[in-house]
């Protein structure tokens, strides 16, 4: 079955440069009751700043810590097609149900060149391949028909994570039989209203119960109810953590909530200023309080 559902992209917790297993375990306890799984070693997980050895070690340990009924998608994006395929094999061998890869991000890309980059991943896999449409990182404006053509050539390409803001791609890809996953928190409500098949964003990791309520209402056809919960409970946090430094702000908030032991980032990322820290916690409290009021109102008398 193609990858779908709520699979938040999660930051990687570190303490003194080492993967913090205790912080990771607390994050799983915080979000797994409300989500279908998660996405590991994506942009939010700082994968581009890690060695391939570190990436494999973190993936192996994280998958061991994750219940078997949860879907884990592992990011394998790389500048080397061969290295990406090796990371994909490792993820699959350790229990990942899918891998996520964007186009290579150093040399200029062409549709044919991206296809040839993806072929070794496709050949290496027995699980699903999710193409990551990320124009900011790859400096490539992928056209919707390109992905449809690639899916016709690649057996395992069944889904797309859309970070581009061209919402029109969603209908094209779904009509072609591809699942589409929301990929940018900044316009998340637009993706949801357009009928995506899942979400690979940060929001469900921060307020998982709230996002689960939104997703449940969408599944029941109640778009107005879903967007009402979204605006009250999720929008404050999404506005506060902003665009461009989401990794740092997410780690700050998770540490402030006692989930992560550290806010530590890999270079070249930098910490945010104290004023933003206060704003983040205030915004989270607003959303959390709104969720508590809704849950109280929903309890039968």
Image (tube, rainbow, N blue to C red):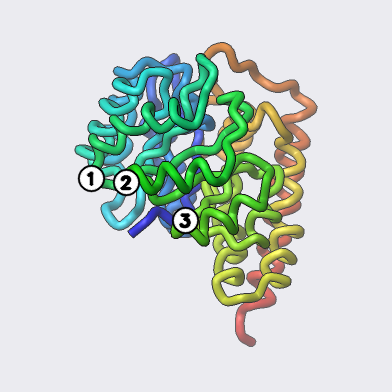
Q: Mark 2 highlights which residue? A: 156
How far across and down, in percent of the image, does residue 242 sit?
73, 35
Tell whether label 2 touches label 1 (CB within 8 Å).
yes
Q: Which element type, helix, strand or loop, lies under badge 3?
A: strand
Residue under the image location 64 percent in, 77 percent down: 298
Report the residue at 58% width, 12% height from top. Answer: 268
Please identify the residue farthest to the top as the structure is shown. 268
Against 61, residue 205 (above or below) is below
Residue 111 in the image, given as x and y percentages of width and height: 49, 31
Q: To which quarter of the image does residue 108 belong?
A: top right
Query: Separation of disc 1 and disc 2 at Cα?
Result: 7 Å
Q: Is residue 236 above or below residue 297?
A: above
Residue where numbered disc 3 is placed? 179
Q: Which residue is mark 1?
A: 126
* 193 left or right, relative to 70: right
Q: Earlier in the sequence, mark 1 or mark 3?
A: 1
Q: Position of residue 272 (x, y in %)?
A: 70, 22
From the top left corner, tell me how far across and down residue 62 is, in percent: 32, 37
């Amino acid at each position: 079955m193609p990858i779908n559902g709520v699979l938040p992209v999660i930051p990687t917790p570190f303490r003194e440069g080492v993967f913090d297993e205790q912080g990771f375990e607390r994050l799983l306890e915080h979000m797994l009751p409300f989500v279908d799984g998660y996405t590991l070693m994506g942009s939010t997980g700082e994968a581009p700043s890690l060695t391939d050895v570190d990436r494999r070690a973190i993936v192996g340990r994280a998958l061991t810590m994750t219940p078997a009924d949860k879907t884990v998608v592992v990011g394998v994006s790389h500048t080397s097609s061969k290295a990406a395929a090796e990371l994909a094999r490792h993820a699959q061998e350790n229990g990942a149900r899918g891998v996520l890869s964007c186009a290579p991000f150093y040399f200029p890309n062409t549709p044919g060149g991206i296809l040839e980059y993806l072929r070794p991943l496709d050949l290496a896999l027995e699980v699903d391949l999710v193409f990551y449409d990320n124009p900011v990182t790859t400096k490539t404006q992928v056209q919707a028909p390109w992905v449809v053509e690639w899916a016709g050539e690649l057996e395992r390409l069944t889904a797309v994570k859309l970070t581009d803001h061209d919402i029109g791609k969603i209908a094209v890809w779904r009509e072609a039989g591809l699942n589409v996953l929301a990929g940018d928190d900044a316009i998340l409500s637009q993706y949801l209203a357009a009928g995506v098949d899942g979400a690979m964003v940060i929001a469900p990791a921060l307020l998982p119960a709230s996002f689960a309520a939104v997703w449940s209402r969408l599944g029941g056809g109640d778009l107005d109810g879903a967007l009402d919960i979204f605006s009250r409970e999720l929008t404050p946090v999404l506005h506060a953590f902003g665009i461009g430094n989401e990794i740092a702000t997410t780690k700050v908030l998770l540490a402030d909530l006692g989930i992560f032991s550290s806010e530590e980032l890999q270079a070249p990322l930098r910490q945010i200023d104290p004023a933003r820290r206060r704003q983040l916690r205030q915004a989270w409290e607003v959303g959390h309080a709104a969720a508590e009021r809704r849950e109280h109102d929903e309890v039968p008398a």
